Amino acid sequence: QVQLQQSGPGLVKPSETLSLTCTVSGGSFTSYYYNWFRQPAGKTLEWIGHIHTSGSTNYNPSLKSRVTVSVDTSKNQFSLNLTSVTAADTAVYYCARGRRWFDPWGQGSLVTVSS
Amino acid sequence: EIVLTQSPGTLSLSPGERATLSCRASQSVSNNYLAWYQQKPGQAPRLLIYGASSRATGIPDRFSGSGSGTDFTLIISRLEPEDFAVYYCQQFDSSPSITFGQGTRLEIK
């Protein structure tokens, strides 16, 4: 069965760039949309953006100026870069597959923005 | 952007009872692109229902979804101990815009 495994640092300094990677295993990687979400403690989920394995992207307008999602089909991976982070970007970040609904999900990565 | 409002915020029920969760959209959800997720503490969301009424793979038939337009419902026909969790609805439109409701916490009475 398809599994998504997230990796990346759990602590990022203010004004720096948050970078996470999601590796897909156990099934076909191509011809799908892959997404990033985040969830601050005690709050609901926020969609950050997605990429199709063809390379086309879409982003949440509220984050668009700071977000880049990229894909590496040779490694079955996709990645998130979020620039100029502040404490408000502290959250659990999730990757997930899908376009209109999302399954499966990665395990989640707590990213704390602090000096 | 479509805003999803879930009610109630918290639902207190006992195992064996029936749970009814509501999700109301600020404008019509096209093509019933509405999904429901279950989330337990420390875990990722789990897809339960997609397309408003289709059960995801491996989801027990005590979970059912219904609705169209702006009003959607998730029903758990007979609560099991493992069903106590937070439930989110989520919509997709072709902008694309993807938004979630604020969640309903289902707790043991």
Image (tube, coloured by chain):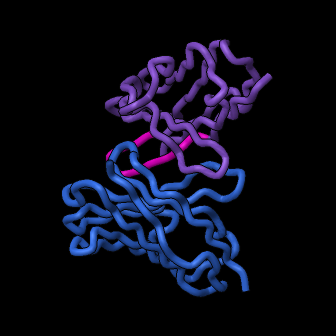
Chain colours: A blue, B purple
The answer to whether any part of residue B66 appears in the image is no
Which residue is at a point 60% across and 79% down the rendered structure image? A85
Q: Quadrant of the C terminus of chain B?
A: top right
Which residue is at a point 36% across and 33% down the rendered structure image? B57
Frontmost residue, A94 versus A61: A94
Q: Residue furthest right?
A: B109
Q: Residue B29 appears at what percent x and percent y?
A: 41, 33
The answer to whether any part of residue B92 appears in the image is yes
Q: Is residue B57 left or right of residue A83?
A: left
Q: Residue B56 appears at what percent x and percent y?
A: 38, 32
Q: Residue B101 appears at what percent x and percent y?
A: 58, 40
Q: Is residue B11 left or right of residue A84?
A: right
Which residue is at a point 44% across and 48% down the rendered structure image? B98
Q: Residue B14 appears at what percent x and percent y?
A: 74, 18
Which residue is at a point 43% across and 63% down the rendered structure image? A5
The answer to if B98 sits in the magenta stretch is yes
Frontmost residue, B59 versus B51: B59
Query: Which residues, given as a range, are shown in magenta?
Result: B91-101
User: So how many labels did they put on this image?
Assistant: 0
Frontmost residue, A1 versus A76: A1
Figure check: B90 above or below A39: above
